[in-house]
Image: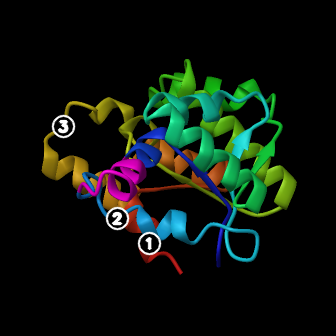
Amino acid sequence: MVLPLVIDANVVKAYFEEAELALPSRLTGSTLPIFGGLGPAHQVAYVDTGNKIEQEWRNVVQPEWFNAWFAGMLASGAVEMVEPTTRGDIIKVLKVKHGFPGDQSDRWYVLTACAVVQRTGGGVALISEDLDFYEPREKKCGSSRRQRILMDSAGKVAKHLRKCEQVYVRSVAVQLAAP
């Protein structure tokens, strides 16, 4: 099943580095297939109508490249906008029970992903390699533990989002392997 996507800025940055600077991926896999597969006939990535995610993406890459790339993504239907949910209870539960920072940018990815679920009536994949979306209390863990968390889509935040909100937190490698 092909799920709509919400993509974290760390993945957009890696895509820019791979596609434009010809640098190898520093994530669990290449981002090129993810972005190459975006389009209304296959898979759509969502950003919030308040431009919080767009600004996060813009902040991690060259502005000139971003302006042209993002305009093209919107025009082609590869990226669509959705009004984020106003359900603050989601962030509160993640913060209190699971240590999710919930401030600033991370909250917009979750609220946008939940809005996509409401809009489409199905699940959404949140593509990130930020441990805040998996297990925030493990941010200082070793690289092998980090890799295992990312590859297993493990952690209390990821589990809660999957079970309660139909938001599937996935690393780049896991997204590429998903059916």
Task: Examine the structure image and report whether residue 64 is included in the region drawn in magenta.
Answer: no
Q: Nearer the viewer, mark 3 or mark 1?
A: 1
Gap between marks 2 and 3 measured at Cα: 23 Å
Name the residue beneath numbered marker 1.
176
In this figure, what is the number of numbered marks? 3
Q: Is residue 117 left or right of residue 149?
A: right
Residue 20 sits above or below residue 87 on the image: below
Dot 3 falls on a residue whose secondary structure is loop
Name the residue beneath numbered marker 2.
30
Q: Is residue 24 left or right of residue 166?
A: left
Name the residue beneath numbered marker 3.
141
Q: Earlier in the sequence, mark 2 or mark 1?
A: 2
The magenta-colored residue range is 14-23
Task: Examine the structure image and report whether residue 22 is included in the region drawn in magenta.
Answer: yes
Please provide percent x and percent y for residue 129. 38, 47
Q: Amino acid at mark 3?
A: Cys
Q: Are marks 3 and 1 in contact (CB under 8 Å)?
A: no
- Residue at screen point 45% across, 48% down: 128
Neighbor class of circle 3 (other Cα within 10 Å; few <14, some 14-19, many 20+) is few
Q: Amino acid at mark 2?
A: Ser
